[in-house]
Structures are given as structure tokens and as C-alpha cells.
Amino acid sequence: MTEDENIESTEKVADEQDNTAPFELGEAELLAERVAVLEAELAEAKAAVLYAHAEAQNVRRRSEKEAIDARAYAVTAFARDILSVADNLSRGLSAMPEELRADGIQKIEALGETLDPNRHQAMMEMPSDAPPGTIVQEMQAGYMIRDRLLRPALVAVAKKPE
């Protein structure tokens, strides 16, 4: 190449570099802007993950508490039903003696009495300070109808201490 051609070639390269410089500067700004957008999206994604993790932890805690409460209070409905039955049974039993007495039915008093095989049925012997043969526990009430045994009282009697 000649010197003139070499100078022209150098000028062309310089012109091309001048022309690409604004393009590269604009591209750098675009890349910087894109990086800023991506960093903002990353920050949002991190916040969303953190929020989701916290929410999952809250759901787990809440479900554990509900499970504990469910186990602790599972018998609530059953207990309410049984209490209603017990109340009604108690009212019925308190009204029953008057009706029974009107028909000549009386409860056999057993506690502290001496065992009478005609009115009591001994189910077991228990060690006690009471004299042997004395009724120390009544398991089921017995009843008489006028002078006849309707049902014997099921009792536990005292035995000699060993």
C-alpha cells in the first residue's frame, strides 16, 4: 500500500470507530437499564419467595394448633350428649322412688348391714375394719315389692384382716 492509501485506510477506521462509539454507548445504557430491571425483578421474586415461605410456616403452625385442639376437644360433642342423658336419667331416678313406693316397691338399704342371703348377694370380700360379714360396698341396689324380694342387692362384704 502506498502512503496515501494507508492514511485513507486509517481515517476510515477512525470514522468507523467514531460511528460505533455512540452505538456502543447506547447499548451500554440499554444493558445497564436491563440489568436494573432484572435486579428489581429478582428483588421482587426474593420478596415473594420470602412471603410464601412465611405464609407456609403460618399455615403449618395453624394446622398443628388445630390438630392439637381437635385432639383435645374431640369428645366435646359426645360429652354434651352424655351430660344431657345423665341429667335426664338423674331426674328420672329422683322421681322414680315416689312412683315405686306407691306400688309397694322399696329399695333395700345394704351399707353397714349384716349380710342377709335373702336380700343380698355377696359378690366379693374386701379387707375392712368392719366386723366380718358386714356389707362395706353396694354395687347394685336391691328392691323389695311389699314383703317379697324383687332383686337382691349386689354387695361386697368385709372379711377378717389377715
Image (cartoon, helix red, strand yellow):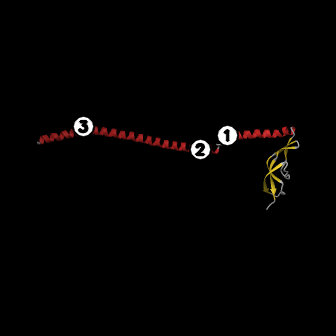
Going from N to C along the chain, the mark reached first, 1 or 3, is: 3
Q: Residues within 10 Å of mark 2 (few under 14, many from 20)?
A: few
110 sits to left or right of 32? right
Amino acid at dot 3: Asn
Considering depth in this image, is 60 or 46 the residue closer to the camera? 60
Rendered view: 27 above or below 130: above
x 44%, y 41%: residue: 45
Query: In the rendering, which numbered label is found on residue 67?
Result: 2
Q: Amino acid at mark 1?
A: Ala
Instruction: Name the foreground residue: 14 vs 107.
Output: 107
Number of marks present in the image shown? 3
Labelled disc at residue 77: 1
Residue located at (76% from left, 40% from top): 89
Q: Residue furthest bottom?
A: 162
Q: Nearer the viewer, mark 3 or mark 2?
A: 2
Residue corresponding to mark 3: 19
Tell me the kind of residue under disc 2: Ala
Sequence order check, earlier mark of 2 and 1? 2
